[in-house]
Image (cartoon, rainbow, N blue to C red):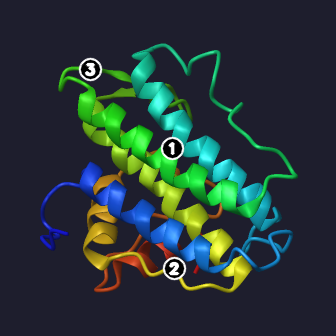
Amino acid sequence: MPTDPSRPFTTVDLDHLAEVAVAAWRQGLDRDWSARAGTLEWSCRRTADHAVDAVMAVALFLASRKQDGYPDWGWGELTMGPDARPQDLVEALGTVARILSAVVSAAPPDARAVIWRRPRVEVRGPDDFAPRGALELVLHAHDVSTGLGVVLAPPADACARLRDHTRDWPHWRSPGWCPPPTTDDPWQDLLVGSGRA
């Protein structure tokens, strides 16, 4: 894994964060997935299900090339429901991360699609979709890992690139969130910015 914190966040980072998240969740397969996921009101099972859907949605946004809003189909529908088995959720998270990575890698540099719709619809190029999915993946991986009582330790260099790439994004101005600080602990910076620290 490259260790240059100054390079842009890429699919290489997304792939690595997914591997770390999947490994952490695997440690908790025998734990109680009905437990609350970190500071969220949702259970670990529901949060994991949402994380799978959220990462897949980002791939669908870019693949659709839709520029006036999210696709009217697909996103919000890739859920396994309240009875999903933990091992299926773990496998699904790795799978959708690989799908997103492949969609980003296959997109021509001039491709454009809606990346978010709040506070307004915004269109971006492929380079922003890997970090968009990575934020969903790594923060919800944290929520689930916390609820299961397993360790999630994402690499600092990937976290630094994710923090720096997304610093001016509107997500950090959501209620309970703030722009992440810049310290020598970029993973903690992401947790602080997202209200999870």
Find out whether the residues at labels 2 and 3 contact each other: C-beta distance under 8 Å: no
Label 2 amino acid?
A: Leu
| Image mark for residue 111 | 3
Viewer-closest of 158 and 32: 32
Dot 2 corresponds to which residue?
A: 152
CA gap, disc 1 and disc 2 = 19 Å
Label 3 or label 1, whichever comes before in sequence order = 1
CA gap, disc 2 and disc 3 = 34 Å
Judge the density around disc 3: few (<14), some (14-19), many (≥20) Cα neighbours within 10 Å.
some
Q: Residue at x 67, y 55 (%)?
A: 89
6 shown above or below 124: below
Q: Position of residue 105 (x, y in %)?
A: 25, 35
Where the N terminus falls, by quadrant?
A: bottom left
**109 horizontally vs 196: left or right:** left
Q: Residue at x 73, y 62 (%)?
A: 86
Q: Secondary structure at mark 2?
A: loop
When asked about the image quadrant of residue 17, the answer is bottom left
| Image mark for residue 96 | 1
Where the C terminus falls, by quadrant?
A: bottom right
Label 3 amino acid?
A: Ala
